[in-house]
Image (cartoon, rainbow, N blue to C red):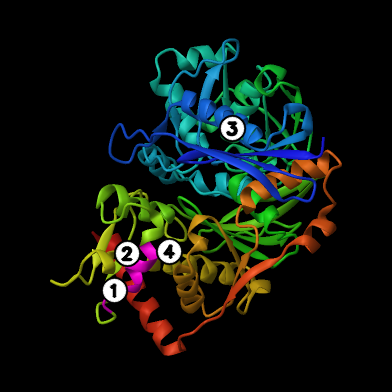
Amino acid sequence: MTYILAIDQGTTSSRAILFDKHMKVVASAQEEFPQIYPQSGWVEHDPSDLWSTTAGSCRAAIERAGRMGRDIAAIGITNQRETTLVWDRNTGQPVYNAIVWQDRRTADLCRKLKDEGHEAMVSARTGLLLDPYFSGTKLKWILDNVEGARARAEKGELLFGTVDSFLIWKLTAGAVHATDATNAARTLLFDIHKGEWSAEICELLDIPMGMLPEVKDCAANYGNARADLFGHEIPIMGVAGDQQAATVGQACFKPGMLKSTYGTGCFALLNTGDKPVVSQSRLLTTIAYQIGGKRTYALEGSIFIAGAVVQWLRDGLKIIREAKETQPLAEQADPGQHVIMVPAFTGLGAPYWRPDCRGAIFGLTRNSGPAEFAKAALESVGYQTRDLLEAMQVDWTDAAGKPVLRVDGGMSASDWAMQFLSDILGAPVDRPQVLETTALGAAWLAGMAAGVYPDMDGFAESWAIEKRFEPAIGEEERQRKYGAWKSAVAATMSL
């Protein structure tokens, strides 16, 4: 029993990766599932898709490795955060589709709560902003809009959870209703200072607290996956939201260490140690991880659209067939054109927080084509990352200077995109040997708790770089490019 199974349940697919005792990938499997867009700005998932693709990818990974359930010491789970589910306590049947983190349907409610003066209290308790991004207002929407849901919740018949809680519930056949501190910290309902659900915020949003899961450490016992799933009961020993799992997987254990993950969105986290830093730049104060009852905090900046802009090139514009075509296409772009894309398809995230914004493209000429669009799409991710890092440096004086940025996620495999990122930041960018850092973080949490993997210091020593990108443009060009981006963002927000 020296293998660890990591479940990485994401926004567009579910993956399972089997790691050996040396934390090396043995086998993996991935299944995509459809996105549901009932209205403009609304994004949903069918909960049955989340479960079936998770279970299916786990079985496939185990089979590809030639292993059996009894060979696996523990399961680690990492997941898309903020996505909200409500299900029947007895049957496990969801009362509505999962409302995805990208969903903006509660923008008016958030605006109303701000106008009533509630944001200061909510931010003080949770470290978050009143934005439809987070789970709390999504949960309120379900209770207010699904027939009979509120009455059933008040009777104790319904449970709330983020995706991790739903998967734990399904894996344990309803025996465990729990979440970890990092996922709880993203719900808008959790007091990150006290480490408990906030009765005050639950009252504000009219949410019965009996719906809420038990909150545990990231490395803890979450019950056993039932034997009929994988042929043997397997303990679930690690849980963390995807961005926190990536922070762990990048071994960002010391204050000042910084990572950025490029998946559907982009998320940068700066470890600030055992004290939460209050942002003056509309960044988020969150829990980076909680181990042994000790909370470590982070400043986080969230970009809603990163890899999703490449998906748009593929599925919307149909100018590429696969994501990997974006780099060679960008390399063909006319250097004389300065096309800027602001991919605010579902609003602008940090540090702007404008859910009402929509995407825009500037600088088009008669000769602008697929190559220029591909280049602008990749560059938009670098520009948005600089927005986040500049805000972090304002908020935390200890982060002054140019810290090294550790990167991971699908887009980090692009040398072109990472070189541009280093150029526009004016700072080194380190890409690790293991790009699957989100899954690795979940695996390490579970493996460490199960006694298979080393402690935090031992894990940090094993982190290895694959390539470092250094800035290759001058300061004048860097500022000119970034100034054009800031002008484009300002114009987008004025539309």
- Three-letter code for the amino acid on which mark 4 is drawn: Val
- Residue of label 2: 374
Quick one: label 4 or label 2, which is nearer the N terminus?
2
Q: In the rendered structure, does residue 81 fall within the stretch colored magenta?
A: no
Residue 19 is situated, as x and y percent measured from the top left of the image, at 71, 44
Secondary structure of the residue carrying numbered label 2: helix
Kindly check if marks 4 and 2 are in contact, taking CB atoms under 8 A apart as contact.
no
Q: In the rendered structure, does residue 333 fall within the stretch colored magenta?
A: yes
Between the C-alphas of marks 1 and 2, the distance is: 8 Å
Secondary structure of the residue carrying numbered label 3: helix
- Residue of label 3: 60
Of the two numbered discs 4 and 2 in the rendering, the one whose residue sits closer to the viewer: 2
Secondary structure of the residue carrying numbered label 1: loop
Kindly check if marks 1 and 2 are in contact, taking CB atoms under 8 A apart as contact.
yes
Quick one: label 2 or label 3, which is nearer the N terminus?
3
Residue 412 is situated, as x and y percent measured from the top left of the image, at 52, 62
Kindly check if marks 3 and 1 are in contact, taking CB atoms under 8 A apart as contact.
no
Q: Nearer the viewer, residue 160 or 125?
A: 160
Q: Nearer the viewer, residue 120 or 228?
A: 228
Q: Nearer the viewer, residue 429 or 6?
A: 6
Kindly check if marks 2 and 3 are in contact, taking CB atoms under 8 A apart as contact.
no
Find the magenta span and give its range: 326-334
Taking the spot 63% from the left edge, 45% from the top edge, the residue there is: 125
Left or right: where 295 falls relative to 286: right
- Residue of label 1: 333
Residue 103 is situated, as x and y percent measured from the top left of the image, at 40, 40
- Three-letter code for the amino acid on which mark 1 is drawn: Ala
Counting other residues with Cα less than 10 Å from the Cα at mark 2, is it few (<14), some (14-19), or many (20 or more)? many
